Structure formats: structure tokens, C-alpha cells
């Protein structure tokens, strides 16, 4: 069963507008790159991508590109616009959230150079280009002052290295660390849960942190290595618990709770927009 970050889709009924960011928002323009239609919602201009589909109702999805609308072929444009106005509060709130998320993602893009910091096990590790180093070597400064990163990753590249070379070297090191740590935590929790997994593999999935199959195969997203150990432990325990309960029933959560009593608090730390962008 896959463990996924949440996806925002329109609810069956419009909830009350509870986001002050929308009510205080100056008239703005939100436009989908493939927008063919536009509508004014509460003084805000929204350009949306409209797709006609075989379905029984009008559907809305607000993603990173903006608003997408899927409507049955027999529904007229006036009815589509009426439905949009009915859910205007929800649509605008999600558009603002996605806009803010896009800004955070843009800010999270890594500038691959000497001195760049990236998250590793919940801490910041500083990249040091060091042609004397072989591969990548992690150094720890136990005497670092509070608020000053204590971890440095010495990468065996010259100061003239291209950003792509630095990125590939660091990513390769992170993936090696992920496999080492994931294997250790899988052994730990498999013993506690009395389950046996047959294979552990790393994934680069964009929409899930991990998955488990009935034959005992476990897949874990290598980018979990950016998070602190409790978050990694939660995903590992979650997937291994599926080897006892291949569902998300109350019994499944009891299995997870048996090895992580505080999992509800820990799983809230898993936010995909907290990760650095490696592109």
C-alpha cells in the first residue's frame, strides 16, 4: 500500500472560506498555462483549462499550474461558470496556497556550488568542494556553536566543477546513505513487528514516500534522507506494518502504534514542499 502526500481536489460541497489570505487578497490574476476560458471570481481573474470528458458531474482540480475543470459534454458554459462561482471560496483559497507553494519550491532550488547547504537527517550539511577528498566524506564538528551547521560534506571535486557534477556527486552520496539507513531501520522494525520483507529498493517517486507489496517487497523514497530519523522511522514502520495488514483499517494503525506510539505527530512532518529541488 503506498504512502502518499495529500492531493487537493474539490470537495463535494463547498466549505466555508476560512483562509484570511483570500479575503485580504488584492484583485489578482491566476492563469493556467493551457487556459482556454476565464472567469472573474470575487474580483479575481481566473484563467482555467477546460476539458470535456465522459463523466456525470463537473470536477475541479487546483494544481501547481492552476485551475483545471473537467465537465460532461452536455453541460453548458453557463452551468460550468455557475458551478465555479458556487465553489469560488475553495478555488481561490487553493489557488493562493498553490501560488505560495510554488514560491517556496522556487526558493528551495539548490544553487550547486561550494558552500551550499542541504538538509540531511533533519540537519543542514554544508557542501565543501575539496579536490583532495576521495568521493564524498562527511565531517562532524561537535564544537559548532548553536545555530551553526555542524556537518560538512567534502566532495572530491575542484572549485571549477560544473553545478551538474556537484549535484550528481551529492545525490549519489545521499542515496548511499539512504540505503544504509533504510536497511538498518527495516531490520529493526521487521524484528519488532515479527514480519519478513523480501527486498528493499529505493524510489524517486514524486507522489509517494513508500510502498509495500504482499510478497514482501518494500520501496522507500530516497529523499526521506532529508528528514530527521523519526520521520524515516514512521515511513519504514508504516510500510512494514502493511505486511501484517494490507489496508488502512483501525487494526493497521494499531500495528503502527505498537512500534511508534507518537506516529500521529511524526507523520505531520512529511511535507514534499520542505524538500530541496535538485533540478
Image (cartoon, rainbow, N blue to C red):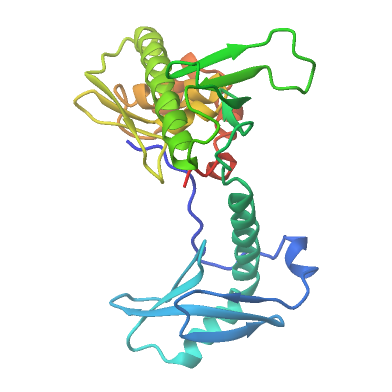
Q: Residue at x 58, y 12 (%)?
A: 139
What residue sits 59% from the left and 57% below the top?
Answer: 102
Residue sitting at x 60%, y 45%: 108
Q: From this view, report whether residue 273 is shown above or below residue 59.
A: above
Residue closest to the eye, 174 or 235: 174
The residue closer to the viewer here, 191 or 97, is: 97
Asked whether, in this view, residue 9 is left or right of residue 115, the answer is: left
Residue 276 visible in the shown view:
yes
Q: Is residue 104 above or below residue 18?
A: above
Q: Nearer the viewer, residue 267 or 202?
A: 202
At 69% from the left and 7% from the top, the residue drawn is 142
- Give the residue at the far left of this rendering: 215
Residue 67 position in % (x across, y down): 51, 71
Residue 206 to residue 84: above or below: above
Q: Residue 44, how many percent across, how many down?
A: 68, 79
The x and y percentages for residue 218 are 29, 26
Amino acid at each position: 500500500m503506498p504512502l502518499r502526500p495529500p492531493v487537493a481536489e474539490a470537495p463535494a460541497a463547498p466549505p466555508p472560506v476560512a483562509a484570511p489570505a483570500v479575503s485580504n487578497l488584492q484583485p489578482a490574476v491566476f492563469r493556467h498555462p493551457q487556459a482556454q476560458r476565464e472567469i472573474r471570481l470575487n474580483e479575481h481573474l481566473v484563467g482555467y483549462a477546460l476539458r470535456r470528458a465522459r463523466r456525470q458531474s463537473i470536477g475541479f482540480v487546483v494544481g501547481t499550474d492552476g485551475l483545471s475543470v473537467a465537465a460532461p459534454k452536455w453541460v453548458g458554459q453557463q452551468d460550468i461558470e455557475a458551478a465555479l462561482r458556487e465553489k469560488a471560496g475553495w478555488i481561490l483559497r487553493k489557488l493562493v496556497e498553490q501560488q505560495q507553494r510554488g514560491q517556496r519550491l522556487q526558493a528551495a532550488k539548490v544553487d550547486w556550488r561550494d558552500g551550499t547547504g542541504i538538509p540531511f537527517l533533519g540537519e543542514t550539511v554544508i557542501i565543501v568542494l575539496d579536490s583532495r577528498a576521495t568521493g564524498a566524506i562527511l565531517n562532524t564538528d561537535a564544537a559548532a556553536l548553536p545555530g551553526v551547521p555542524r556537518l560538512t560534506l567534502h566532495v572530491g571535486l575542484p572549485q571549477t566543477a560544473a553545478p551538474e557534477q556537484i549535484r550528481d556527486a551529492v545525490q549519489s552520496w545521499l542515496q548511499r546513505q539512504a540505503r544504509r539507513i533504510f536497511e538498518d531501520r527495516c531490520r529493526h522494525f521487521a524484528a519488532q513487528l515479527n514480519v519478513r520483507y523480501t527486498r528493499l529498493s529505493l524510489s524517486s517517486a514524486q507522489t509517494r514516500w513508500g510502498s509495500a507489496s504482499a510478497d514482501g517487497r518494500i520501496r522507500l523514497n530516497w529523499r526521506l534522507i532529508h528528514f530527521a530519523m523519526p520521520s524515516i522511522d514512521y515511513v519504514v514502520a508504516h510500510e512494514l506494518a502493511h505486511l501484517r495488514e494490507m489496508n488502512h483499517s483501525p487494526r493497521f494503525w494499531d500495528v503502527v502504534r505498537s512500534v511508534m506510539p507518537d506516529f500521529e505527530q511524526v507523520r505531520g512532518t512529511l511535507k514534499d514542499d520542505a524538500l530541496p529541488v535538485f533540478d
